[in-house]
Amino acid sequence: MTNRQFPDIRFDIDRRTALQFLGAGAMAAATNSVTGLASAAGEDEIIISHGYSYFGDLKYPAGYPHFDYVNPNAPVGGEISVSTRGTFDGMNRFNWQGKAGLFSGLIAEGMFGDGPFGTATPADSITDAYGLIAETVEYPKSKRWCVFHMRPEARFADGTPLTAHDAAFTHDLFLEQGIRSYARAVKERIEGYEIIDDHTLKYNFVDGISRRSLISQVGGTPVFSKAWYEETGERLDKQSLKTPMGSGPYVVDDFEINRYIVYKRNPDYWGWHLPINKGRHNFERVRVEYFADDAAEFEAFKAGIYTFRAEGSTKKWATGYDFPAVQKGEVKLETIADQNPPIPTGFVFNFLRDPFKDKRVREALSLAFNFEWTSASLQYGLTKQRHSFAENSEVEAKGVPEGLEKAFLESLGDLVPAELLSEEAVLAHTSNADRQTDRRNKRKALKLLAEAGWEVGAGGKLRNASGEPMRFKIMQSAASSDTAQAIITTYVSNLASFGISAEAEKVDTAQYTQRYYDKDWDMIFFRNQPFQIASTGLKQSYGSETAVVSSYNPQSLQDPLVDAIIEAALLTESREEEIASLKALDRTLRYLRIQIPAGYVADNWVAYYDMYEHPEELPPLGVGYLDFWWFNEDKYKALKAAGALR
């Protein structure tokens, strides 16, 4: 789907499941200390809680009725239909081959609750996780292990009991057949498990490592039916038309490859009574329509073939919404504030390819991108420039390092370049908005390239000492929007004026997906992971250990300073220290020039047929249109009577 904060960009790589990004996890730990099942003589203080976080108190106490931002009396029913572009070849989202159907991972749940359609849960705190399959979680203050006390009423979609045996089976399944970088990371951090009884499962963690995200990690792993896998012979690492057996509030109702998928609300879902689900999952059906290209997709919305559109095109938002349904008030347009840091998107280098290994080359290639001209000429001035990997958050690095951040960097010794301590955090360069190619930036870039051994030679081409031209391709998906393609084409044109032979390479979505995972590309217009907390997921996103195989580290970044910062960040003991360490990480990533930053839209743009409603006050971490919005039957009937919907 298109990311709202990065207009005109469609991310063709689905996030297979939250567990692949280790540790979205939590900062706080909370609750009443009691003597638990696993306590023993000499054990440190034992905590049993209805939820988990790392540093402080949970926002919602035990016995909370529902999340503050939901409407607990929201009506249930109706259908919401959304769109996506491209193709899919199966319904197993948890494999690492092929391209699974959008949202096909929503059928599964973990010990802690999450948003099946991707909305943060809860959507008003970045620190908290609350029990879903697990009624309580038990752990010592040292967090050397944890025990999940599972709800005995939990059931899979086929009505069979969900037990600790299924959770343990799933843990092993991901180690044996899951994403390689995930499996490797888990094996190094999770010592093993113990099935205490049918509804009690203990995880033991490896000694001598950070405890920062381990409980969150095992608590976020989806649970599948052991019996289903044994009966069907299915594999997690193979694409399939069968959907793994999970326990979520929605199940797959119908699909046709490359045309549509329909998910239906499970009336027999075991967890409707839980406070974590109150006011959520209100639509009877969620339909996903597939389209081959941007034009067909938008025309289908205008015709009412699908009914909710999260708009990512600046051009369409500026000029496209003047069709009759909007003029009549049948389609509602809404701008919704977004308090999340924008996802760091831009031109991403593959560090496994020459000449991108040289920071001077990366900086020079950055100078060929003219954000100001691009925003004004291609995006209607609706985008803002991004400088940071944690833009507009408390962990964004600014100015020269001071206080705790400076002390943190100094503690890393000779790994830290002197200029990182003495100079201000790198900002995206400015350009002349009136000219596609900024001459001042071009001169600076050519100087950097000359220092790196690249000079303009015969035919005006940039060549190295061996006479080889600088040549690379920018891979893009055939499903990219017209504006995204124009941004890439413009950048290629600017590079040509520098004497660089760059080429925009358009490939079909299936090939794009496979080549992305294989790191078989030079440059792409893509994204990195933002961060606001320290978690082991940072190792997958920016660490050296799994760089070549991790899909969350598209650059294959391998840098000893970044590794040291991540390791030290995971050992911080207060939020203040954590913020300082993440500022240092942001500062270092910008210093290394790992990406050419593109612009972002500060708000969420949504257009929908006026039959959907939401709470008056939306939470800061998600729009939640597939999570806690609802359907108005009377408005739907009025739209049908007016002929606005088919």
Image (tube, rainbow, N blue to C red):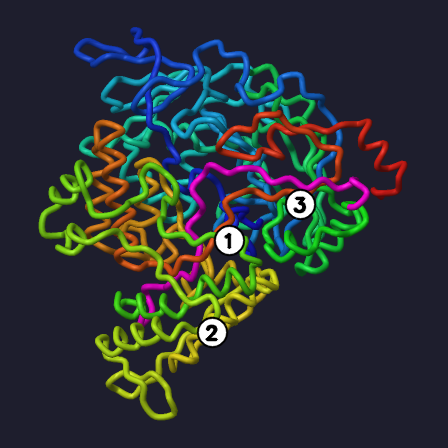
Give residue 255's position: percent from left, percent from top: 71, 45
| Mark 3 nearby-residue class (10 Å; few <14, some 14–19, many ≥20) | some
What residue do we see at 31% from left, 76% from top? 443
Tell me the SS state at disc 2. helix
**Cα separation between marks 1 and 3:** 19 Å
x then y, percent, for residue 458: 34, 93
Residue 610 at what x, y percent from top left?
A: 75, 36
Earlier-in-chain disc, 1 versus 2: 1
Discs 1, 3 touching: Cβ within 8 Å: no
**Quadrant containing the C terminus in the rendered view:** top right
Q: Is residue 295 in the magenta section?
A: no
Residue type indicated by callout 2: Val
Of 109 and 237, the residue lying toward us: 109
Residue picked out by circle 3? 309
Residue 345 in the magenta stretch? The answer is yes
Q: Which contiguous range is marked in magenta? A: 327-355
Comparing marks 1 and 3, which lies closer to the viewer?
1
In this rendered view, identify the residue nearer to me: 85 or 430.
430
> Which of the two labelled residues, at mark 1 and mark 3, occupies the earlier sequence position?
3
Q: Is residue 28 visible?
A: yes
- The residues tagged by marks 2 and 3 sit, at their Cα atoms, a distance apart of 30 Å
Residue 463 as seen in the image, left or right of residue 107: left
Residue at the spot of label 2: 492
